[in-house]
Amino acid sequence: GLKNVILTDHCYVYGLLPATAGCEGHKAVGFISHMDTAPDYSGKDVKPQIIPDYDGGDVRLNGTGAMLKVSDFPTLKDLKGRTLITTDGTTLLGADDKAGVAEIVTALEEIISSGMPHGDIWVGFTPDEEIGTGASHFDVKRFGATYAYTLDGDTEGEIQFETFNAAQAKLTFHGTNVHPGSAKNIMVNAALVAMEYDSLLPAAERTEDYEGFYHLTHMEGSVSDASLTYILRDHDAHVFDNRQKTMRQAAKFINERYGAGTVELDIRVQYRNMAEVIEKCPIIVENAKKACKAAGVEELILPVRGGTDGSTLSFMGLPCPNLGTGGHAYHGPYEHITLEGMDQSIQVIRELIRIFGEQE
């Protein structure tokens, strides 16, 4: 029943539920989720396990025999009595973010059938969020919303409007390879130089909440050539910039020690903290809080310790906080969600639309 439904060459889907009579002048609101699943684990041929009236204990994943343990995922205790949906252990579930797609469509079906007054409601489904490019070709002007929400979080009731500042750093090391029997004062072992570079950075950080980190994601090397790839994350923009400076200073030290051009460093900023944009239009957070209250869902104001399309979209001119979908343990075989959590997320969407529909 949506209008202006478009599938673009870049695999974006847009649609519009036009405003009801009398609400045409209200601010348009959008809801966005992504269709891709994480490349960390297979998402093909998912065989979900559906457990009505879940007892709150450990769950055997029948495809592999692995156990979804309460000791590893304590929030399972809070799901007792619900209809729990898990994987069979051979794939991820895909709730990230097909749950968001399902919740948005279901909420609109309910709104259309109920006749609830509302302004323009835009829907957008994106590809490639999991590799950080989900909003790269998003057409904000075509989308037409003033504000939007991604449905891409965890627990129902989550309202997330602070994200990491994020960058990827790639380093290439060039060595000098000669026979080790006659290598004194000649050989430069690129693999060892790469290890030395890593030792110049702060030790691996175990972080939470607003704490940032350097994270080595890939390494390979030989005597002749080596490479390291890191991701840098921090909520604080000043600390984020200092992390980049630290990496550049370490590269400078290596080149001074082993010769110019021994290491090449390329840092690419991936996204910035959406709070810089969201704080200028607090109505979108306040309305989300009101929607949670009206839906009887506890609001959870949490920083995003990862990326979301909303980070990029906010800086493209579409302020876009993130809301929970009811899922947990994304990106692997222990991913799970509950029917009731999804239902509550749907009610939050409905209440948001109602609230925006009542505001001039």
Image (cartoon, rainbow, N blue to C red):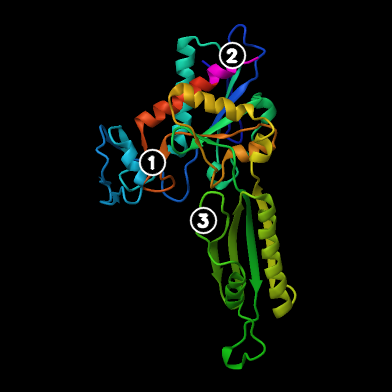
Residue 147, located in which quarter of the rendered image?
A: top right
Q: Position of residue 338 (x, y in %)?
A: 35, 34
Which residue type does callout 1 highlight?
Answer: Leu
For marks 2 and 3, the one nearer the N-term is 3
> Helix or strand or loop: what does disc 2 sit on?
helix
Q: Residue at x 27, y 33 (%)?
A: 81
Local crowd at mark 2 within 10 Å, few (<14), some, or many (≥20)? few
Q: Position of residue 196 (x, y in %)?
A: 60, 75
- Magenta-drawn stretch contains 56: no
> Helix or strand or loop: what does disc 1 sit on?
loop
For marks 3 and 1, the one nearer the N-term is 1
- Magenta-drawn stretch contains 359: yes
- In depth, the one of 84 and 93 nearer the eye is 84
- For label 2, the residue is 358
Q: Position of residue 350 (x, y in %)?
A: 49, 20
- Give the residues drawn in magenta, as a range: 353-360
Residue 170, located in which quarter of the rendered image?
A: bottom right
Where 285 falls versus 330 (above or below)? Answer: above
Q: Quadrant of the C terminus?
A: top right
Which residue type does callout 2 highlight?
Answer: Glu
Give the Cα distance between marks 3 and 1: 26 Å
Of circles 3 and 1, the one toward us is 3
Q: Position of residue 114 (x, y in %)?
A: 46, 11
- Circles 3, 1 touching at the beta carbon (< 8 Å): no
- For label 1, the residue is 93
Which residue type does callout 3 highlight?
Answer: Thr
For marks 1 and 2, the one nearer the N-term is 1
Q: In the rendered view, does 225 fall on the left or right side of 101?
A: right
Give the Cα distance between marks 1 and 2: 37 Å
- In depth, the one of 111 and 186 nearer the eye is 111
